């Protein structure tokens, strides 16, 4: 051994798997032609294993808990050990299972951006992706949500991660960043999905409904490319380690710069000013 941590295993297996000893891939749909672990249209669901308790990073959408519970048990944890869920944003595919999870496990603390809570408290579900979500299932919100702000520390001893606001795809997008298993690790949600199959630098879906902002997004990606993590864990698709993480972020930045270079972008779909968008 040379003292360096073992390379992360970013392979998508047809079963839950350890990316690093403390980070497990326990849920996803078949997006990106990956073998699905849980239901459509679930995002990636990661289990961060701590000494005293474990944390889920995002929790998908489906009301069905059985597959996720089974995967958590299969990797040596237990649903009752999941003390917290850290939500990268309130988009339906990352967030809506939280209501079903907390109905069964009411001790679980769900943490999400304070911006998301402000919208939800006004019964405004545009950040959830209301019109899309409604076609899939009724919008379901946990009874209690704990607000997160940029710069706050999150704890899953022995790990401490810092909340990093990554707006642009949506205004409530957060990343969670810190040293896990000796490696600078970033859970990026949909802010940076990165190189997937033959497509370089995939980014979150831009839409005026959920208040995407290209100018803000450019600043976010410039910040990320200036300080790439050693392990990038996106909300969809395969994770990226080492040089691949830096390369993926650079490709995300280039994609958005190309998009932003379109003349009259603000007059084009999908960037519709919020006041011109009807949300029923
Ligand atoms: Fe999203
Ligand atoms: Fe997503």
Image (tube, helix red, strand yellow):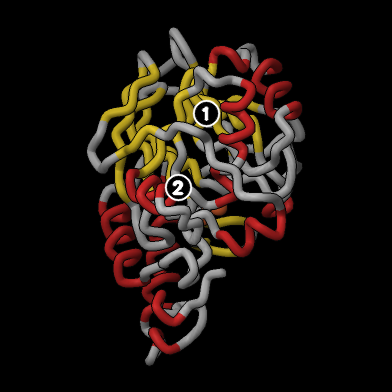
Looking at the figure, which quarter contains the C terminus? bottom right
Residue 22 seen from this side: no
Q: Identify the residue at image location x=57%, y=27%.
A: 102
Q: Is residue 189 left or right of residue 73?
A: left
Looking at the figure, which quarter contains the N terminus? top left
Residue farthest to the left, as pictured: 151
> How many numbered tags mark residues here?
2
Q: Identify the residue at image location x=65%, y=35%.
A: 27
Q: Identify the residue at image location x=48%, y=77%.
A: 277
Where does residue 180 sit, x and y in percent of width and height? 39, 25
Residue farthest to the top, as pictured: 52
Where does residue 167 sit, x and y in percent of width and height? 34, 57
Specify few, some or many for label 1: CA neighbours under 10 Å numbering under 14, 14-19, or 20 or more. Answer: many
Q: Is residue 54 left or right of residue 217?
A: right
In this view of the protein, which residue sits in the foreground, 139 or 240? 139
In the image, residue 236 above or below residue 81: below
SS at badge 1:
strand
In the image, residue 86 above or below residue 201: above
Circle on res. 89: 2
Residue farthest to the front, as pictured: 122
Where does residue 79 sit, x and y in percent of width and height? 61, 17
Choose top left, top right, bottom left or bottom right for residue 219. bottom left
Residue 115 seen from this side: yes
Where does residue 191 sit, x and y in percent of width and height? 43, 54
Disc 2 to disc 1, C-alpha distance:
13 Å
SS at badge 2:
loop
In this view of the protein, which residue sits in the foreground, 82 or 166? 82
In this view of the protein, which residue sits in the foreground, 156 or 6? 156
Lower position in the chain sequence, tag 2 or tag 1: 1
Circle on res. 56: 1
Mark 2: C-beta under 8 Å from nearest atom of ligand 1: yes
């Amino acid at each position: 051994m040379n003292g360096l941590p073992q390379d992360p295993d970013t392979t998508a297996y047809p079963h839950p798997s350890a990316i690093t000893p403390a980070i497990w891939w326990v849920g996803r749909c078949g997006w990106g032609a990956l073998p699905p672990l849980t239901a459509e249209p679930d995002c990636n669901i990661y289990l961060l294993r701590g000494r005293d308790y474990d944390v889920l990073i995002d929790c998908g959408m489906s009301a069905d808990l059985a597959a996720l519970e089974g995967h958590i048990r299969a990797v040596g944890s237990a649903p009752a050990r999941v003390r917290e869920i850290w939500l990268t944003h309130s988009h339906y595919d990352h967030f809506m299972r939280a209501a079903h999870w907390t109905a069964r496990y009411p001790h679980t603390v769900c943490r999400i951006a304070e911006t998301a809570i402000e919208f939800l408290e006004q019964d405004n579900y545009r950040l959830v992706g209301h019109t899309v979500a409604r076609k899939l299932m009724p919008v379901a919100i946990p009874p209690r949500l704990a607000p997160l702000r940029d710069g706050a520390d999150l704890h899953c001893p022995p790990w401490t991660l810092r909340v990093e606001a990554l707006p642009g795809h949506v205004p409530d997008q957060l990343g969670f960043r810190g040293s896990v298993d000796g490696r600078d690790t970033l859970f990026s949600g949909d802010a940076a999905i990165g190189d997937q199959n033959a497509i370089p630098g995939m980014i979150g879906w831009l839409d005026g409904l959920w208040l995407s902002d290209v100018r803000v997004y450019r600043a976010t990606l410039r910040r990320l490319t200036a300080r790439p993590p050693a392990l990038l864990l996106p909300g969809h698709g395969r994770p990226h380690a080492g040089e691949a993480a830096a390369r993926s972020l650079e490709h995300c930045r280039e994609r958005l710069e190309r998009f932003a270079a379109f003349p009259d972008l603000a007059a084009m779909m999908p960037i519709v000013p919020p006041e011109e968008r009807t949300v029923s």
